[in-house]
Amino acid sequence: MSLLEPDRYFSRVSAVSLDDDLLALGLTHVLLDMDNTILSRATHSVPLDVMKWIGDAKRAGIRLCLLSNNWHRTPYATGEALALPVVAKAMKPLPSGFAAATRKIGGTRADTVVVGDQPSTDVLGAHLAGMRAYLVAPLVEEGEPGHTRFVRALERALIGSPEGRDPANACRKGDPL
Ligand SMILES: [Mg+2]
């Protein structure tokens, strides 16, 4: 399997079932990407369903850490608003940020999964660090910086578009895209 190929695909964070896709698999720690995974670039806010998912995950005993390449103040403000620990300026896909975030929440490679929207940073980095990776569709693609659009086009060329993927791994029916 390519290092860029995620272990699972989801339409969005809230489509990841806490029971079936995390706890049943022994995944009790989650490293969450920020930009376009939980924070919309269009509205600069966290959608309500994502906010509820984070709250439900915490109540289920799942430990979460934001892991972001963002160099601005946003990851800290978002972490504060959601009461989540943060590793920013992570330089994904380099493994150091993944290791720091995992340590921060007391996880191990085996019980931690990375959830993010970009194969070349979130998925590749998770796999280089020896962890599983769940890829979500980006919340919003419009308005993304030129370099991100370029990287997405390259990623699609390398691993194909979500539409062509194995339906067993694809989004659940009825999930909003
Ligand atoms: Mg992202």
Image (tube, rainbow, N blue to C red):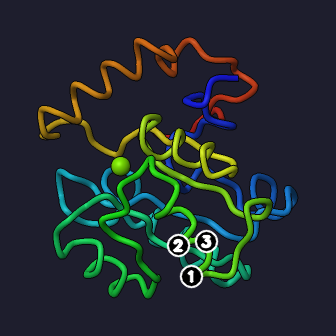
Q: Name the spot of residue 89 as percent of width and height, x first.
A: 30, 65
Q: Which mark is residue 102?
A: 3
Give the amino acid at mark 1: Lys
Q: CA distance from mark 1 to mark 3?
A: 5 Å
Give the amino acid at mark 3: Thr
Q: Nearer the viewer, residue 141 or 127?
A: 127
Mark 3 surroundings within 10 Å by alpha-carbon count, few (fewer than 14), some (14 through 19), many (20 or more): many
Q: Name the spot of residue 108 as percent of width and height, x first.
A: 74, 69
Q: Which residue is mark 2?
A: 100
**Drawn side of residue 136 relative to residue 156, left or right:** right
**Drawn side of residue 100 relative to residue 131, left or right:** left
Residue 21 vs 66, above or below: the answer is above
Q: Name the spot of residue 127 as percent of width and height, x first.
A: 63, 43
Quick check: is the Cβ at mark 3 less than 8 Å away from ligand 1? Answer: no
User: Measuring 17% from the left and 51% from the top, which residue is drawn there?
Assistant: 42
Q: Which mark is residue 104?
A: 1
Secondary element under disc 3, as helix, strand or loop, is helix
Secondary element under disc 2, as helix, strand or loop, is helix
Residue 50 vs 152, above or below: the answer is below
Q: Are marks 1 and 3 in contact (CB under 8 Å)?
A: yes
Give the amino acid at mark 2: Ala
* Quarter of the picture holding the N terminus: top right
